[in-house]
Amino acid sequence: MKILFVTSEVHPLIKTGGLADVSGALPAALQTLGEDVRLLVPGYTQVLDKLENKRTVAAFSVFPGQPEVKLLSAKMPDTEVPVYVLDAPQYFCRVAGPYQYELGGDWPDNAMRFGMLSKVAAMLGSAASPLAWRADILHCNDWQSGLAPAYLHLGGGVHAKSVMTIHNMAFQGNFDRDWLGPLDLPQSCFDMHGVEFHGYLSFLKAGLHYADRIVTVSPTYAQEIQTTEMGYGMQGLLTVRNGDVSGILNGIDDKEWDPATDRYLTAHFDSSDLAPKAAGKRALQQRLGLEEQARAPLLGVVSRLTYQKGLDMLLECLPKLLDGGAQLALLGSGEDDLERRFGQLALRYPGRVSVTVKFDEGLSHQIMAGADIFLMPSRFEPCGLNQMYGMRYGTPPVVRRTGGLADSVDDASLPDGTGFVFDEPTPAALYRTVAAAIDCYRDLPKFQRIQLNGMRRDVGWRVSAQRYIDLYRKIE
């Protein structure tokens, strides 16, 4: 099969979250299984700077009145997966992030930027393709490529089948209906049976309505998004399309995330020898200015600092946990209030709390390896990858039973338990579970059993990639 994987970010070229990790690892896994898979990504400055041996393979017009764009071809670093880059400097070569400018607001022309990405994706899956290569399957990811299935459908003729993967229903790409004209969409599609959503043009709604199949990043989340609580207004459409909705749990890049070979670690270990993990903990304490106490339970957090992630609940618990001897290493950024409150906690507990407010890939690996227990108390979590990183690095996670956390972490009370699971999204339930995890940590044989269960769990992409291939074949 010829598969075009359309994404707005991909590791290691550009990353704001888990979508980039999936976009870097899943196509590589599909290629390993023998499929002809290629990526399509926007030509952000960061992407152009990191890709080598780029060559122009096409130049064409996408929308009436818009400047001509180029399509560049290259290979992904390390994996050799072919990647097409949409080179439209006026839209993508900008300072700051892929979706927002430096002060935190959305780029005002995001509709045009990602409408163009969607339209080019659809072209590569239809007779309008400027390339000899033409996709059989268009695999779209989140709202940024959500218009691609609509363009395929509205364009008519023989075209690729489309799969729409939802990584997070909360992000929908809703824009004023005045964008219909510039995006070359007919007024007739602005309907509840089309791209319209509460009076707005919705990229995600378009993808959910027009795609041949809808996939979420975990089986539990596939059910959750069909409820009023977690459907964000689109649960009705998803319920109607229930037979086309499925959940495939994400995997992780088990070469990038391997404590035996991790380039960011000075002390390597695996399930046959956990002893060097203690040296990683000591190195992390030294780097972050934490007291070097070998048996102080070190809690790790690597996360966006948002309400979704349940970190306000954690703030309620932490003083009691810290007063009981725990330490905290936190890496992340997000909501101003949470950044401020965690910063205040670090001032209140010098030597016991470290808060790093930025993105640091190396430090994220070092926290996974050096912490004793990883905290991920999300109110909802479509899939999540960090809990699987924690398991692989012998750092059992504390998670809420929701979405992909429910599908990937088994509670320590089970014989094959890999972490600690709670149900109610309350500070009290979180505290009880972290306290139980710390008690378990002090029972070394019991804790090591949980560590080894997690480290030996297959959380790589191969099984999940095969499930995607099976899905593609059903609709091809």
Image (tube, grey):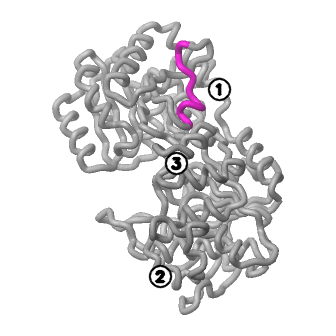
x and y percent of residue 130 in the render?
Answer: 74, 81
Instruction: Name which residue lies at 63% across and 57% down.
Output: 77
Badge 2 vs badge 3, beta-carbon distance below 8 Å:
no
Query: Relative to residue 215, is residue 432 drawn left or right?
Result: left
| Callout 2: SS | helix
Q: How many other residues sit within 10 Å of disc 3, few (<14), some (14-19) or many (≥20)? A: some
Q: Tell me which segment is drawn in magenta.
A: 404-413
Query: Which of pointers 1 and 2 lies earlier in the amino acid sequence?
Result: 2
Task: Find residue 269 and name its label.
Answer: none
In the image, is residue 328 part of the stretch drawn in magenta? Answer: no
Q: What residue is shown at x 40% (from left), y 14% (from top)?
A: 436
Give the distance between the C-alpha atoms of the residues marked 1 and 2, in whole angstroms.
46 Å
Q: Can residue 48 be seen in this view?
A: no
Q: Which residue lies furthest to the left in this view?
A: 348
Residue 405 part of the magenta-drawn span: yes
**Circle count:** 3
According to the image, label 3 marks what residue?
Answer: 18
